[in-house]
Image (cartoon, coloured by chain):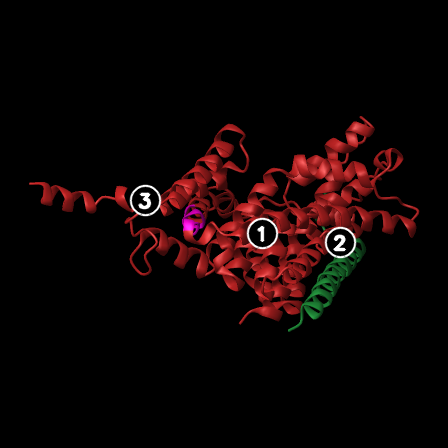
């Protein structure tokens, strides 16, 4: 009687539990808590947290190659590079490039903020990460989740979970991370600089922008094509005004569906064996460093541009050059209004903010071009 | 591929790409201002 019971018990997961798995449950539950209670990037952190719980339940086979359900989501959604570009389609359908077109010099702030990506890449490599891992860690500084996932799946799939969680966590913490750096690097007078109203942008310009920029960026960095093509197609849906249904589908149904299939398998890559390593702590530390440096270099570039222009830029706008749309732009506006209540920076900050998305895609494309096996 | 090369190549690539887009925006604006057609202007 005891022998069959014992055999039956051995088929359950209980005796296969390890302390590492239980520790990962705690991490998964913390992410779920942050998503629900604090509303930190809940659309991603909630499924990621649940995916972590599933990945650390023994004997489920959910991530077994060829057969596991979550493995299939991962393989065909992320490894085949389908989901991040589809998310970019939705982002494009949401994005108004008008503020950027109205004041195109702000595009350089989106480029300046990518310096943090390369600084962190260099630092991570110096700390012993191989060159492809270092690139994946560096891209966290771009504050763009889908691009981080896209690059990690190409260069360092073993770091995908940690880098994705770091990216989304820090994106959620933009209102906490950025303001102290912004105050530290700007004077009160600089924060009070009022931006001149941008010129009016014609509908034709808004229509031409996604087409022309698709050509230019893909010709320059062909490896960025999956992301930039979908981003600009989504934007063309938006600006054309003749495919409302497609625009709405890209913004809503499609985006929501792929978000589910993105978060769950990312969480599922984070099993205890892979995740509980000292280098994961370094990834989180370096990701934070990337964010800080990106914010600082964006601000420094804005200050540098002011040296050569009579039409001054409020240097706070440089902080919006990290992607994190539209959170970083909102933070710029908030810090600006703390110095001058009448200073309305939100629309101006959207320019470098959307430029940051393009800049991060180009940075990722360059990494893929130079490093992909 | 050395890290230094990737560092320099990456930063230059991003700035070069952004410069191209900047120029394309300026040229597009110039052309559409010159040939406004019937398109409505929208506030930025």
Q: Does the stretch in magenta take in A271? A: yes
Is residue A205 in view from this perspective? yes
Mark 3 burial class by Cα count in 10 Å: few <14, some 14-19, many 20+ = some
**Residues shaded magenta:** A264-272
Residue at 71% of width from left, 39% of height from top?
Answer: A178
Q: Locate residue A107 relative to residue A157 in the image: left or right.
A: right
Mark 2 burial class by Cα count in 10 Å: few <14, some 14-19, many 20+ = many
Marks 3 and 2, how far apart at CA:
47 Å
Which residue position holds label 1? A283
A210 or A155: which is nearer to us? A155
Which residue position holds label 2? A112
Q: Quadrant of the N terminus of chain A?
A: top left
Q: Earlier in the sequence, mark 2 or mark 1?
A: 2
User: Does residue B15 sit above or below A203 in this rendering?
Assistant: below
Single out the residue that lies furthest toward the top: A341
* Circle 3 or circle 1, nearest the eye: 3
Colour assigned to chain B in the rendering is: green
Which residue position holds label 3? A17
A360 or A288: which is nearer to us? A288
A42 or A196: which is nearer to us? A42
Q: Position of residue A208 (x, y in %)?
A: 67, 56
Q: Does the stretch in magenta take in A117? A: no
Q: Position of residue A116 (x, y in %)?
A: 70, 53
Q: Earlier in the sequence, mark 3 or mark 2?
A: 3
């Amino acid at each position: 009687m005891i022998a069959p019971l014992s055999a039956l018990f051995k088929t359950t997961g209980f005796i296969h539990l390890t302390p590492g798995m239980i520790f990962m449950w705690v991490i998964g539950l913390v992410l779920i808590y942050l998503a629900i209670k604090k509303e930190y990037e809940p659309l991603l952190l909630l499924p990621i947290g649940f995916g972590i719980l599933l990945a650390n339940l023994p004997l489920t086979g959910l991530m077994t190659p060829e057969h596991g359900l979550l493995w299939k989501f991962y393989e065909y959604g992320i490894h085949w590079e389908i989901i991040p570009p589809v998310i970019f389609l939705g982002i494009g359908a949401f994005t108004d490039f008008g503020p950027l077109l109205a004041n195109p010099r702000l595009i350089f702030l989106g480029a300046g903020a990518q310096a943090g990506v390369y600084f962190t890449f260099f630092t991570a490599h110096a700390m012993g990460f191989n060159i492809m891992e270092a690139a994946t860690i560096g891209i966290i500084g771009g504050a763009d989740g889908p691009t981080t996932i896209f690059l990690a799946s190409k260069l360092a799939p073993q770091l995908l979970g940690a880098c994705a969680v770091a990216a989304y966590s820090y994106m959620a913490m933009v209102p906490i991370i950025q303001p102290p750096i912004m105050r530290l690097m700007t004077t009160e007078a600089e924060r009070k600089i009022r931006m001149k109203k941008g010129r009016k942008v014609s509908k034709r310009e808004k229509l031409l922008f996604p087409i022309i920029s698709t050509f230019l960026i893909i010709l320059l960095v062909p490896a960025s094509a999956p992301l930039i093509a979908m981003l600009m197609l989504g934007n063309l849906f938006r600006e054309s005004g003749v495919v409302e249904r497609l625009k709405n589908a890209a913004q809503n149904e499609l985006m929501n569906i792929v978000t589910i299939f993105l978060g769950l398998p990312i969480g599922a890559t984070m099993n205890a064996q892979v995740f509980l390593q000292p280098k994961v702590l370094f990834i989180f530390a370096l990701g934070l460093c990337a964010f800080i440096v990106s914010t600082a270099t964006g601000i420094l570039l804005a200050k540098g541009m002011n040296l050569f222009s009579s039409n001054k830029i409020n240097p706070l706008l440089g902080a919006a050059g990290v992607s994190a749309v539209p959170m970083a732009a909102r933070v710029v506006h908030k810090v600006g209004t703390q110095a001058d209540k009448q200073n309305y920076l939100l629309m101006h900050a959207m320019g470098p903010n959307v430029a940051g998305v393009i800049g991060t895609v180009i940075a990722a494309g360059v990494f893929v071009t130079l490093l992909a096996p | 591929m050395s890290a230094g090369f990737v560092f320099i190549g990456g930063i230059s690539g991003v700035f070069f790409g952004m410069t191209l887009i900047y120029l394309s925006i300026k040229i597009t604006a110039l052309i559409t201002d010159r040939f406004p057609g019937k398109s409505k202007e929208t506030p930025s």
